[in-house]
Image: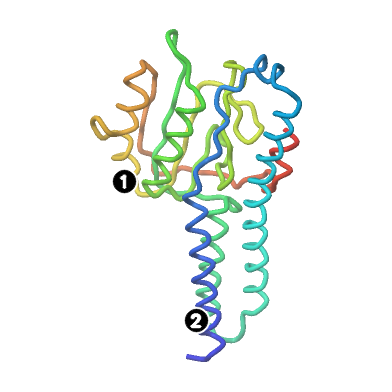
């Protein structure tokens, strides 16, 4: 194997490690934001909170920009080695899928969460569902056709509605996940430990889970940077 090819493959491995690490970043949680409480906070507290969130998102954005830079470098450095080209193209495709930059289609599960007369679905319910699906190997996730990416956030706003990446969503919340159907479903339905028992049934909430063979999840259309949260 040529020395240049070895270097490229090693670099690809480093990129994959970074991407896998990003997959396990916990979703940023902004739960039960009460407008009255916000209004009562001192100006200094608000400034401190805003600075903290901006720092977190700037760090994530720096990692994201670094990945995009590496992708461009890999594309430019592809030579005549057919195997190296094929490997790089495959890794770039996987990277785009993980980052939510491409449309995805395949088998998976659809979870529908619905408000009922007794209780409403909360941001916490969706966050726990997203994390459970990620841990079960979901390749792509969406909520009401909004693609979930590595720095997506879900928030309760004044107990009235839920925001996902700045977009207002209402019941029913249709969560689609592409991946191994058995793994995805088992993590949600396991007795006493699964999502249904620990998050939904115990609190009288309503959820329906079904397998589907032709799920389509569109690519993320927003902007993946720190300005996204600071301006909303």
Residue at 62%, 51% in the rendered image? 60
Q: Position of residue 63 (x, y in %)?
A: 62, 57
The reply, left or right, for residue 39 in relation to residue 113 is right
* Rendered view: 114 above or below 166: above
Q: Which element type, helix, strand or loop, lies under badge 1? A: helix
Q: Compare residues 173 and 229 and report the one nearer the observer.
A: 229
Residue at 66%, 52% in the rendered image? 61
Q: Position of residue 209 (x, y in %)?
A: 36, 31
Q: Position of residue 105 (x, y in %)?
A: 49, 49
Q: Position of residue 102 (x, y in %)?
A: 59, 53
The part of the image, by quadrant, that contains residue 221 is top right
* Nearer-N-terminus badge (1/2): 2
* Rendered view: 3 above or below 75: below
Determine which residue is flagged by label 2: 83
The reply, left or right, for residue 1 in relation to residue 228 is left
Disc number for residue 208: none
Disc number for residue 183: 1
Count neighbours of disc 2 (C-alpha within 10 A) and say few if under 14, some if 14 to 19, many if 20 or more: few
- From the image, state whether disc 1 or disc 2 is nearer to you: 1
Q: Quadrant of the C terminus?
A: top right
């Amino acid at each position: 194997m040529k020395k240049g090819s070895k270097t490229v493959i090693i670099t690809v491995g480093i990129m994959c490690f970074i991407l896998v690490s990003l997959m396990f970043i916990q979703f940023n949680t902004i739960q039960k934001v009460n407008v009255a409480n916000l209004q009562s906070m001192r100006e200094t507290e608000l400034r401190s909170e805003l600075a903290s969130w901006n720092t977190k998102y700037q760090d994530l954005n720096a990692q994201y920009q670094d990945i995009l830079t590496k992708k461009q470098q890999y594309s430019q450095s592809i030579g005549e080695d057919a195997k190296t080209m094929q490997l790089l193209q495959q890794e770039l495709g996987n990277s785009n899928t993980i980052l939510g930059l491409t449309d995805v289609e395949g088998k998976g599960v659809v979870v529908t969460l619905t408000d009922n007369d007794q209780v409403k679905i909360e941001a916490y319910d969706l966050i726990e569902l997203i994390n459970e699906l990620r841990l079960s190997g979901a390749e792509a996730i969406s909520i009401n056709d909004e693609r979930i990416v590595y720095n997506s956030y879900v928030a309760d706003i004044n107990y009235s509605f839920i925001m996902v990446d700045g977009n207002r969503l209402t019941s029913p919340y249709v969560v689609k996940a592409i991946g191994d159907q058995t793994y995805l479903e088992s993590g949600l339905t396991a007795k006493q430990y699964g999502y249904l028992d620990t998050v939904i049934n115990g609190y009288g909430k309503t959820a329906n889970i079904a397998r589907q063979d032709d799920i389509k999840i569109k690519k993320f259309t927003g902007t993946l940077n720190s300005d996204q949260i600071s301006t909303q």
